[in-house]
Amino acid sequence: MENPSFGRKFYDVFRMSLNGEQRDYTQGNLSKAIILLAIPMILEFGLESVFAVVDMFFVSKLGKHAMATVGLTESVISLVYSIAIGLSTAATAVVARRIGEKNPEEAAHAGAQSLIIALIASVVISFLGVWYAGKILSLMGGDERVVAEGAVFTRIMFGCSLAIMLLFLINGIFRGAGDAAMAMKSLWLASILNIILCPICIHFLGLKGAAIATAIGRSGGVLYQLFHLFKGGGMIRFRLNHFRFDSKLFKSIIGIAWPATFQFIISSCSWIILARLVAQTGGTSALAGYQIALRNFVFFILPAWGLSNAAATLVGQNLGARLPLRAEQSVYKTAKYSTVFMGTVMFVFIFLAVPIMRIYTKDEAVIYYGALALRWIGSANIFYGMGMVMIQALNGAGDTRTPTLISFFCFWLFQIPIAYSLAIGFHLKATGAFIAIPVAETALALVAWFYFSRGKWKTIEV
């Protein structure tokens, strides 16, 4: 009998990755484990990108003031995303460790404790956001019309902070348990509901309809998650006793979550500062080209994000199973796949930068700056691929402080000063800011690899 072709084998693995069957990732073929985890994670992040694009597409029909309101609100609500990602990272690390130890009861207990933390944080953020919605828009630079028309949108978005928090957090729990397919399905449901409801709600309710559609979409995804956590047949199943307050575990989760939260804040602030520098030194055309280049970059690195999150799950579970060598091997193998993929994308960005930009605009100045940005950003793609895997591997081991310190050094103490020095000191203007991105990302990858290779992450207890 003939051996199945590569295409057939890949199709079988692809189908398996979407089934959501329970698997033991502490044994068996590592390459297969990486692919089974990465595929649904890639699709999950892809749908999150669609979520944001759909919102902005329909809101843009309401005019520039509506777009300004959404942009300003999203800038502030990124705090909620930061906390959600931090808690999600902590949940993935702790749940994966308990699953690796073959202790699903304690994994469920850890997941339940993280939900309590999310509930407390959401109540505080929601109250402040709803009460001070108008002032938030004003402080962010919104004019009187933006404040008057957009306050209700901001109130609804902040009022639904719990849905945002839980959607990210519970997906982190599923990923830690190795059920990446369930995480993908819940975000798919949230995105599909939003895509369907967004134009309808905006048509009848205007800008606040966009917030309502987003809230319903995310809440639908959370309800789907909770059903499978309480009633489903997965590896993680919640019961009321899992929610008994556990001060030691509570502190442990927060201890892992807060540095991970700052990781996201550090990188986000760095991109914002660079965008301001590009606008300051290159003008509107440079800023527009830079933003288009960034959106393409983010889209093309989705597979690398999926691979890096697969590495986090594999590290956590294999450390829990007392298999540090397998955990290490899984990271190096994942990093290899990621660098090969990102190396391919690098050639696309370098040689097809102009055709890519022409898809979005006919403005020659924007095309020039966008292509320049895409080539400089893409020149370090191999290091992005390696760095993302190493950072997430450390996070997956529960060592979130080391990646936070690396990010702080490489972005705030290295990237930003270099960008200003090149752009203003050496008169390279926007090009100087573009150059600083691959330089800093290369440094981050090398430093992260150095700390990972030292192996101290193997001794972290969570």
Image (cartoon, rainbow, N blue to C red):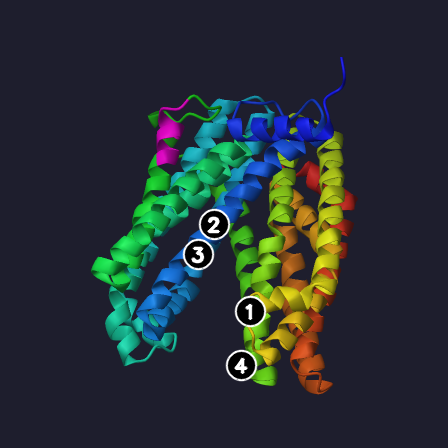
Give residue 52's mark.
3
Q: Position of residue 248 (x, y in %)?
A: 48, 37
Which three-letter amino acid code belongs to the residue tagged 2?
Glu
- Range of the magenta residues? 224-232
Which residue was labeled with disc 1? Answer: 291
**Separation of marks 1 and 4 at Cα, in angstroms:** 11 Å
Question: Does label 1 or label 4 sit earlier along the sequence?
Answer: 4
Q: Farthest top residue?
A: 1
Q: Secondary structure at mark 1?
A: helix
Which three-letter amino acid code belongs to the residue tagged 3?
Ala
Give the position of the C terminus as an image quadrant.
top right
Q: Is residue 117 left or right of residue 14?
A: left
Q: Are marks 2 and 1 in contact (CB under 8 Å)?
A: no
Which residue was labeled with disc 4? Answer: 284
Which three-letter amino acid code belongs to the residue tagged 4?
Thr
**Separation of marks 2 and 4 at Cα, in angstroms:** 28 Å
**Separation of marks 3 and 1 at Cα, in angstroms:** 15 Å
